[in-house]
Image: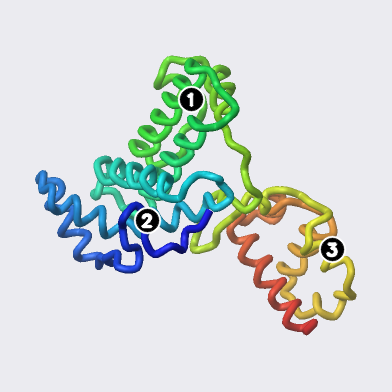
């Protein structure tokens, strides 16, 4: 899938407008008063967000124009449902909405057919999850979703599993403090390129350049094969902090070994 083309769905991507924070605020105030022109300007000013999201689906065989259109639907839903009184950036709210819309499209067009009843259950659960997240500003549990839609939690789990598409190891899980955590960061893999690199070199001197905490993290990650989540639990810090310290440590070691 090529996403670097200049024109997608008749839109010249090289000339998409960039809105300032003040412009976004003013436009959103007009949108809330029913100003359709402001809504159109806000959509155009956020189309770059859709482009950045569809790049995540580069491994898909779907036509980029189709994904862009579906992403725009997600963007419009985000604009219509965004609560500007919450202390959340629009992009933070919109990206999951756009991703969700594209994933629903890909699931519905998947060659592996899933029964309509299962899809309906899964979509009810997804919409309930989005509403509960918006209301409570925290990820709802399966039990809470079950109570909200009146469907047994076992049926919800089964339905959600049935519509899942294969996940890439490089799919982002979440972002905290500017550090993105990927699926591969949550998997213990003794055959990873980074661990092979560690095992195949003499690192005793390089590891002396690390702080005690960084040294401990490298040992746990690459010599004991623990996941970042397991390391975080052991040394009582967040997974994002483990990721940041690990990256800094590897950078220090690689720089020393050059």
Q: Which residue is drawn at the image coordinates 81% and 79% (left, top)?
A: 206
- Measured as percent of width and height from the top left, residue 8 is found at 37, 56
Compared across the picture, whether 245 is left or right of 52 comes to right
Q: Nearer the viewer, mark 2 or mark 1?
A: 2
Q: Is residue 39 above or below residue 5?
A: above
Is the residue marked by circle 1 packed among few (<14), some (14-19), or many (20+) residues within 10 Å? many
- Looking at the image, tell me whether mark 2 or mark 1 is earlier in sequence order: 2
- Looking at the image, tell me whether mark 1 or mark 3 is earlier in sequence order: 1
Q: Badge 1 is on which residue? A: 122
Quadrant of the rendering where the C terminus is positioned: bottom right
Q: Nearer the viewer, residue 121 or 61?
A: 61
Q: Nearer the viewer, residue 185 or 159?
A: 159
Q: Is residue 81 visible?
A: yes
Q: CA distance from mark 2 to mark 3?
A: 42 Å
Q: Badge 3 is on which residue? A: 196
Q: Which residue is drawn at the image coordinates 50% and 44% (left, top)?
A: 62
Q: Is residue 238 visible?
A: no
Determine which quarter of the picture holds residue 105: top left
Q: Which residue is drawn at the image coordinates 49% and 62% (left, top)?
A: 177
Q: Badge 2 is on which residue? A: 8
Determine which quarter of the picture holds residue 236: bottom right
């Amino acid at each position: 899938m090529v996403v670097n083309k200049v024109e997608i769905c008749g839109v010249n991507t090289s000339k998409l407008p960039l809105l300032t924070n003040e412009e976004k605020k003013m436009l959103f105030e007009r949108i809330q008063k029913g100003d359709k022109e402001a809504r159109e300007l806000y959509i155009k000013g956020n189309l770059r967000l859709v482009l950045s999201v569809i790049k995540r689906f580069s491994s898909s065989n779907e036509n980029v124009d189709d994904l862009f259109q579906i992403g725009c639907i997600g963007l419009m839903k985000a604009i219509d449902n965004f609560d500007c009184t919450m202390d959340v950036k629009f992009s933070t709210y919109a990206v999951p909405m756009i991703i969700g819309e594209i994933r629903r499209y890909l699931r519905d067009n998947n060659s592996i057919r899933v029964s309509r009843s299962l899809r309906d259950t899964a979509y009810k659960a997804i919409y309930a999850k989005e509403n509960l997240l918006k209301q409570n500003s925290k990820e709802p549990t399966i039990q809470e979703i079950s109570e909200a839609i009146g469907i047994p939690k076992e049926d919800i789990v089964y339905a959600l599993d049935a519509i899942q598409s294969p996940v890439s190891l490089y799919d982002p899980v979440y972002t905290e403090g500017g550090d993105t955590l990927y699926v591969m960061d949550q998997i213990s893999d003794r055959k990873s390129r980074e661990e092979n690199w560690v095992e195949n070199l003499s690192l005793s001197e390089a590891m002396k350049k690390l702080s005690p905490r960084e040294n401990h993290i490298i040992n746990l990650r690459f010599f004991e094969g623990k996941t970042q989540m397991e390391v975080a639990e052991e040394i009582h810090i967040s997974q994002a902090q483990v990721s940041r310290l690990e990256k800094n440590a590897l950078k220090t070691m690689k720089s020393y070994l050059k």
